[in-house]
Image (cartoon, rainbow, N blue to C red):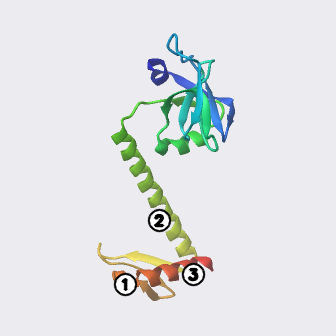
Amino acid sequence: MATFFSAKFVVSHEANRMGYRLSGPEIRQKTGKPVSIISEGSLSGNVQIPPNGQPIILLAEQTVGGYAKIATVISSDLGQIGQAIPGNLIRFQQVDLATAYALKRQRQQNLDHIRTILALDLLDAKGGLYSKGEDWLPHIEVDDNLVTGQNPASSKAAGEAIVELLRK
């Protein structure tokens, strides 16, 4: 495992949506251990070590595997792995479960923020206006009409009005 976590691996040309084969230092299995195992269920992000010692990161549509699994890429990093192209370098870092969950929450918050920005840009392009006064008083106006304010009871109508505006 020391080699696995200290080495840099290169995404090979044998990389597709099913999995990425990596090239780098050989990951040797312990003496006396089988090089293959009985096929078993796999998850996106599982890292398998085939007999040649070059890691394979399993991705989409990979449901079973028969090579030893030594690690799993955390879910918050799978998108970055999926964007890698042949020749890119990948390093693995060991993290505990609490860190993995914290990184997942942070990634979700970042994505939510991006979605909000994109939605506001689209709303603006369609003639809507989002403004925020006091911290407790955000509101949306469309054609100078207040669509929603601080009243939670208006949220359903506001949501419907926003969806309708974005469909135009």
Name the residue rendered at 48%, 59% in the picture: 114
Which image quadrant is residue 12 in?
top right
Mark 1: give few (<14), some (14-19) or many (20+) Cα within 10 Å: few
Which image quadrant is residue 14 in?
top right
Q: Is residue 88 visible?
A: no
Q: Is residue 104 visible?
A: yes
Query: Which residue matches tag 2?
Result: 116
Assign a secondary structure to mark 3: helix
- Closer to us: mark 3 or mark 1? 1
In the image, what residue type sits under mark 2? Thr
Instruction: Work out whether mark 3 precedes mark 1 in sequence or the reverse, and give the earlier one.
Output: 1
In the image, what residue type sits under mark 3? Glu
In the image, what residue type sits under mark 1? Ala
Q: Residue furthest bottom?
A: 145
Mark 3: give few (<14), some (14-19) or many (20+) Cα within 10 Å: few
- Give residue 135's position: percent from left, percent from top: 29, 72
Q: Between residues 137 and 68, which one lies in front from this camera angle?
A: 68
Q: Between residues 117 and 9, which one lies in front from this camera angle?
A: 9
- Closer to us: mark 3 or mark 2? 3
- Closer to us: mark 2 or mark 1? 1
- Give residue 133's position: percent from left, percent from top: 33, 76
Q: Between residues 24 and 124, which one lies in front from this camera angle?
A: 24
Assign a secondary structure to mark 2: helix
Instruction: Work out whether mark 2 precedes mark 1 in sequence or the reverse, and give the earlier one.
Output: 2
Q: Residue 124, labelled with which disc?
A: none
- Give residue 1's position: percent from left, percent from top: 45, 20
Query: Which residue matches tag 1?
Result: 153
Assign a secondary structure to mark 1: helix
Name the residue rendered at 52%, 68% in the picture: 119
Query: Which residue matches tag 3?
Result: 164
Instruction: Work out whether mark 3 precedes mark 2 in sequence or the reverse, and give the earlier one.
Output: 2
How far separated are the C-alphas under marks 2 and 1? 21 Å
